Image (tube, rainbow, N blue to C red):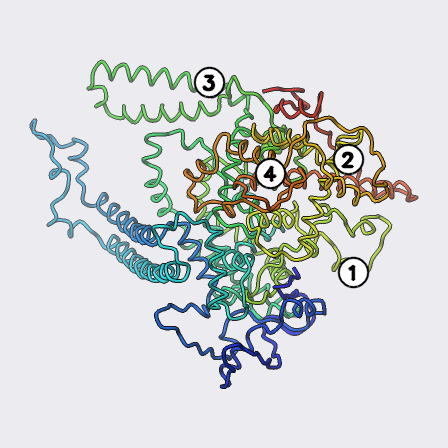
Amino acid sequence: MSSPHINYRSLDEEMASPFQEQRRPPVTVITTTEKAKDAKTQAAAAHLDPLDDHGLEQALEEPDTEHEAEDTPRNSGVMIHMVPETGRARWNHIEDLDSFFSRMYQYQQKHGFQVIVLDEVLQVLEFGFVVWLLVFVTHFVRYDELFGDVPHNGTKTTLSDVIYPTSEWGKRVGFFTYLIVFIAAIYLGIRLLKMVYHITQFADIRRFYNSALHIEDSELDNFTWHDVQQRIRRVQAEQHMCIDKESLTELDIYHRVLRFKNYLVALMNKQLLPVRFHLPLIGEVVSLSRGMLFNIDFILFRGPGSPFQNNWQLRDEFAVRSNQTELAQRLSKLILGVALLNLLLAPVIFVWQLIYFSFSYANILRKEPGALGLRTWSNYGRLYLRHFNELDHELDARLNRAYEYADRYLNSFSSPLLAVIARNLLFISGGLLLFLLVLTMYSIHVAEVEHVVTIMAVLTTVGVIARTLVPDENLIWCPEQLMTAILAHVHYLPSEWRQQAHTARVRQEFGHFFQFKAGYLLSEVFSPFVTPFVLIFVFRPKAMELVRFFRTFTVSVRGVGNVCSFAQMDVRKHGNPDWQLASELDEMTRPGTQQPHHQQQQQDPQQRSLAGGKTEMSLLRFTLNNPEWQMPKEAKQFLRGVREHAVGELVQAKTSTVQENPLTNSLVSFGTIGEEYCSLANSVLAAQLTPHQLEISQSLRPGMAPGQSRGPTSGGFPVAGSDFRQMLQQNLSASMGPTDSMRHLGLSRAEGRVEGPGETLLYGLCGMEPRVGRTPLNVGVADMCLSALYLHELSQQRRQARQSRIDEAEDERPGPSNWPPRPPPAAPPATAGSRHTVITSKAAESTPLLGSIRS
């Protein structure tokens, strides 16, 4: 995205390689302290940008014909001469800022140096413990004594009788065991070296936090990542960690921490990741295990021969159009080699994962066998639902808020056949378990009978599983309402699911996002045997598409390096026409419009845009969490247009007889999420219109005179700006206020700044000045929920309007029609009574199966 602080160009241009630094004439830089006298100092000064804000804006308006190099000195040939100040740590010119900022983020999220060191040490000890325990239980335990097969003439069996003497340990270990221990020792040594390296790196991060950011470890939990980020920007202005830019923006820091993760989000949206595949006798499977993610990350980003030659730069040959076939063949061979290596190591990885998960969940399953019946967000769901430039703690907080609604939605479905079988299994297992328990209570010797305890454990497990299959008799079935609440928090769901939440197809597809814990563990345990074949037969055929993706959607950002162009969140370049208020695609969507093939490739919005409004929603979330970010002009216009459009629809609903539009529908859906959201929606609809809102509405509809009446005004009690702000703080903290939520989550896990966003859609709808006073953190959460619902309503309206234009043009065209039949329009949400009544009823909805249901 073109920006006053960013200069980039697409790699798809027929010009010089964008990955090679272009030579520029030397620029004289005048400082206020003293004039540079030696050539080295002048060369270092030439790296700094000599343009001010106005000069850089003018330069960006012209065609970009030269490339700004990423912040690495190895290709520039420039020697940096720095004179360190006494008594102060210098952090100028950090070569690998990606790793540095990533470690800074981990340091803040993991609560400091002591926790990180202890975690690193215990991870190494866990591996050593597993190896020792396996060798011990397989060679040094006398199981005949342990199981009582050897008579003792009435004497008690002791621990020394069960374990072989240490003098015999060497004789009981064979060659194969020595080989396993030797390999484990080599791996353990590598882990030890890696641990020492990590500790030294985090020790450097601790010095940076303490000396540069002035944050001690004891105070680390009192700072959010947003606070740390603002201090990083101040240190950059003082010490120039990045020598290619005078200042770092919030987006620059996010790019460096999430460079490869943003690529994965775009690849998922473009359906280039091996997520769906067919298994014999099973059919289509949707899965993305951690092992698969590790292999994809190694193949595409970090391994030898991957498209990236380092953490911040794509290989130069990707800029040449003529060698796509060669690059695709090279990538295909790399995928094949990694797959064969996975196939060779599959038994070892399988055994290790089986042991690891058994040790991790043994104690949990002993106390809570029903834990396997709980659900969790799958790796596929987390990547599908992730925004661009969204950190892990931000994603976790958003998905955690949707957890309860997602769990209730999937639990509302039940199979009558499985329910009948489960009730009978529950009856039989309960009867047998009760019989054994009564006998055990009568005589303790019953528990000593062979396999009695095992039978009781199996019966208990069967009962727990059967109970999860029996539906709750008091359950109210309201899938549309629950799906609306899920959409408000996760922000991304396929548009085809609209008004289809009651169907088995949508339930099954959503189950891939939100799967059982047992299914998640099984997919992880057996992934070593599945991953090699998926890489060969699913991922490898996409090698050419992957090469074209990296070549087309990679841009070079000054001071950052090569990033995914979608991560720039440029709504002008990568925005989806269905999510834009003003689309340039009206003529292109007409059936009679014909364009040359090369123009269609350059202007086809399906190639340069993303599905589901990923660009628009990511931009909106990023601005709410980073209100200080100086966004480009196009982003400001988009956000201002959305908010002004919403204000115009609110005025229209209150001053005309037609009160149903995307905003009012969104407010109705917003009010069904919860009690606090219901109160907010009612207050917005009942608030008195302000002169500022009327002025915005008149600017959107200039054909009406300022004094002209617009129809009967809707009644409602006035809500002043200060009252609305107080109502926000009270309602959003009714069940759990910001203080309580931070006590549970920790302030370090907060999204954005604690003061909350500066400009929100909610404040705009109530005609308030956005930057008056301080707002709670949860206002941003509520505003993002409403914005997500509103943008989905707008996109649905635009899709229907576009389809109507296509159908009208097709009806006017003579001859037989080759266009597909028009899908039936989605039914509007059921409304009964006044707007206030609709929102407070919360659960009223209409479904083809059950009609109107209330909870």
Residue farthest to the bottom? 38
Residue located at (50% from left, 79% from top): 78
Front residue of this view, candidates 309 and 534: 309
Question: Which residue in the structure is indicated by mark 4?
Answer: 785
**Residue type indicated by callout 4:** Cys
Q: Are marks 4 and 3 in contact (CB under 8 Å)?
A: no
From the viewer's perspective, tell me whether residue 651 is left or right of residue 676.
right
Question: Which residue in the structure is indicated by mark 1?
Answer: 599
Q: Secondary structure at mark 4?
A: helix
| Residue 51 vertical position relative to residue 219 in the rendered view, above or below | below
Front residue of this view, candidates 54 and 113: 54
Within 10 Å of disc 4 (Cα), the crowding (few <14, some 14-19, many 20+) is: many
Q: Secondary structure at mark 1?
A: helix
Q: Secondary structure at mark 2?
A: helix
As measured in the structure, the alpha-carbon distance from the residue carrying label 1 to the one carrying label 4 is: 38 Å
Quarter holding residue 702: top right
Pair 3/2: label in front: 2
Q: Secondary structure at mark 3?
A: helix
Q: Which mark is residue 423?
A: 3
| Residue 173 vertical position relative to residue 1 in the rendered view, above or below | above
What percent of the width, then of the height, locates residue 339? 48, 56
As measured in the structure, the alpha-carbon distance from the residue carrying label 3 to the one carrying label 2 is: 55 Å
Question: Which residue in the structure is indicated by mark 2?
Answer: 652
From the viewer's perspective, tell me whether residue 342 is left or right of residue 779.
left
What percent of the width, then of the height, locates residue 850? 65, 20
Front residue of this view, candidates 109 and 279: 109
Q: Are marks 1 and 2 in contact (CB under 8 Å)?
A: no
